[in-house]
Amino acid sequence: MKIQFRWIAILGHPRDFKCFLTHKILHDWLIQRGYHVVIEESISKFLNVNNPNIATFIQIGEKCDLGIVIGGDGNMLCILRQLSYYPIKIIGVNCGNLGFLTDLNPNNMLLMLSKILSGIYHIEKRFLLEVDVLNNKIKKNSVAVNEIILHSKNMSCMIEFELYIDKKFAFYQRSDGIIIATPTGSTGYALSAGGPILSLSSKVITIVPMLPHTLSARPIVINDNNIIMLKVFNLSKKLQITCDGQVKLSVIQEKTIFIYKSKYFIHLIHPVNYHYLNALRKKLNWSKNFF
């Protein structure tokens, strides 16, 4: 049975302020159809609307059935991480560039949303990665939708580390860093570093070296239940863990880092005609005739 959405949140802080017109159009359209519309507090000051329902991410996660994110993949990643602790469903309107996570086009947004809100949609559950950076008994933690990266704070600076999978030694490496990515993140930074594109339904994690100092280093795909442990060396260099290119955890005295599948999930809403291969063909210009 399809979920009937009654409380709907409008989210997303696009870089182009013209996109806030899309927020207002969506807000007025939902209000006219009798939905309870909640506006995320950081964008409320940019919308000239009369709506008392202004809320934080926590309040939105606890109260709303559906969140509509207007922006690009950067907006989606930030919001998905913050709302992954709640059962809220998310759909995106693409006002960015590629938009792998944002399905709807602003030009036909209302037509597609009318179908979704009437129950004609597909729902997809995707897992996240979680990282623990240990320093004695102090733990720094974060989650990631796309990828977790160990790297130096200084550009083009090689680091040294060992990688273990389920406590078994896998390899030692000198490189610019390592990318640990979900299937969702396989079309992100991992792809540009030479990693494989993974089916979104695959229960795997990909490990992709960043500019390794050896010709034999290759991406590895492992089971999503495997636990990855990184042991870093030469801590005189300033190292960093980055989640989705947005959350940064410093690695100064820490020597051990654990990366594993999170117990939290994200729930994405898609139009019924959505297909991942169609999205890849469109976004990556596959089979396009250049001559």
Image (cartoon, helix red, strand yellow):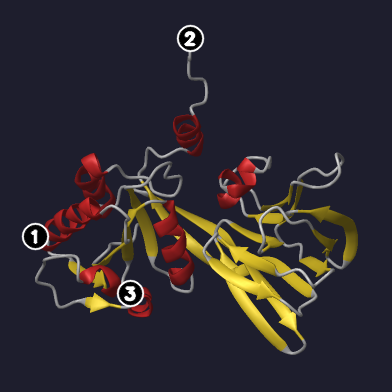
The residue under the point 62% across, 69% down is 262
**Residue mark closest to the camera, 3 vs 2:** 2
The residue under the point 37% across, 42% down is 272
Residue 85, percent across and down?
48, 74
For the question of whether residue 190 can be seen, the reply is yes
The residue under the point 46% across, 59% down is 77
Q: Residues within 10 Å of mark 1 (few under 14, many from 20)?
A: few
The secondary element bearing badge 1 is classed as helix
The residue under the point 80% across, 75% down is 255
Please state which amino acid type lies under the numbered disc 2.
Answer: Phe
Residue 162 to residue 98: above or below? below
Q: Is residue 174 left or right of residue 2?
A: right
Q: Residues within 10 Å of mark 2 (few under 14, many from 20)?
A: few
Q: What number is the disc on residue 291?
A: 2
Identify the residue position indicated by label 1 in the image.
32
Q: What number is the disc on residue 60?
A: 3
Please state which amino acid type lies under the numbered disc 3.
Answer: Ile
Q: Are marks 3 and 2 in contact (CB under 8 Å)?
A: no
Residue 281, percent across and down?
49, 30
Residue found at the far top of this picture: 291
Whichever of callouts 2 and 1 sits on the residue coming sooner in the sequence is 1
Residue 93, percent across and down?
31, 50
Please state which amino acid type lies under the numbered disc 1.
Answer: Gln
The secondary element bearing badge 2 is classed as loop
For the question of whether residue 38 can be seen, the reply is no
Q: Residues within 10 Å of mark 3 (few under 14, many from 20)?
A: many
> What separation in Å lies between label 2 and label 1 (alpha carbons)?
49 Å
Q: Are marks 1 and 3 in contact (CB under 8 Å)?
A: no
